[in-house]
Image (cartoon, helix red, strand yellow):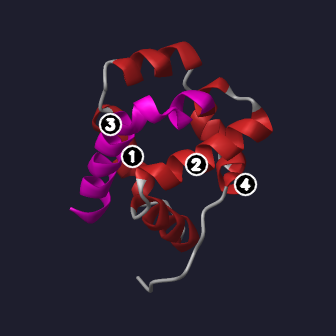
């Protein structure tokens, strides 16, 4: 796949809001506190979706997977400021850094072997 320069902003997060809000905030908070590997839990569904992704979506995902957690959390915080969605606030909290790092690594394993 060609490497394209893509930037990810809070607009991308807002546009993909249903992905974040499908999980009730109380469950997300519990999973974050237990440092649960959600990517591993939903690996079958993720792998099924992987084959259906457009090139544009794949480029965006690769961009996110190459970002630092600090950058991701900054974008999540900006999206939270716009939407006030609790799930975004939970994920933007610096205490969730380990949770995000672990799940991002698992995503990289699925998409890049």
The magenta segment: 89-113
Q: Which sits earlier in the primary sequence, circle 2 or circle 3?
A: 2
Residue 47 position in % (x across, y down):
34, 50
Q: How far apart are marks 3 and 1 (CA)?
A: 21 Å
Which residue is at the front of the view, 21 or 29? 29
Q: How crowded is mark 3: few (under 14 residues within 10 Å), some or many (20 or more)?
A: few
In this image, 97 relative to 112: left or right? right
Residue drawn at x 61%, y 30% as measured from the top left: 89
Q: How crowded is mark 1: few (under 14 residues within 10 Å), some or many (20 or more)?
A: some
| Pair 4/1: label in front | 4
Q: Residue 98, labelled with which disc?
A: 3
Q: Residue 74, labelled with which disc?
A: 2
Residue 35 position in % (x across, y down):
31, 26
SS at circle 4: helix
Q: In which quarter of the image is the N terminus?
A: bottom left
Q: Distance between the residues labelled 4 and 3?
A: 24 Å
Q: Which sits earlier in the primary sequence, circle 2 or circle 1?
A: 1
Residue 26 position in % (x across, y down):
53, 13
User: Does 33 sit above or below residue 95?
Assistant: above
């Amino acid at each position: 796949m060609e490497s394209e320069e893509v930037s990810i902003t809070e607009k991308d997060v807002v546009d993909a809001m249903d992905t974040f809000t499908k999980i009730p905030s109380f469950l997300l908070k519990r999973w974050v506190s237990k440092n649960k590997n959600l990517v591993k839990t939903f690996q079958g569904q993720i792998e099924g979706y992987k084959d259906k992704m457009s090139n544009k979506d794949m480029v965006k995902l690769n961009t996110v997977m190459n970002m630092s957690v600090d950058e991701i959390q900054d974008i999540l915080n900006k999206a939270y400021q716009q939407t006030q969605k609790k799930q975004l606030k939970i994920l933007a909290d610096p205490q969730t850094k380990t949770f995000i790092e672990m799940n991002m690594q698992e995503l990289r394993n699925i998409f890049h072997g």
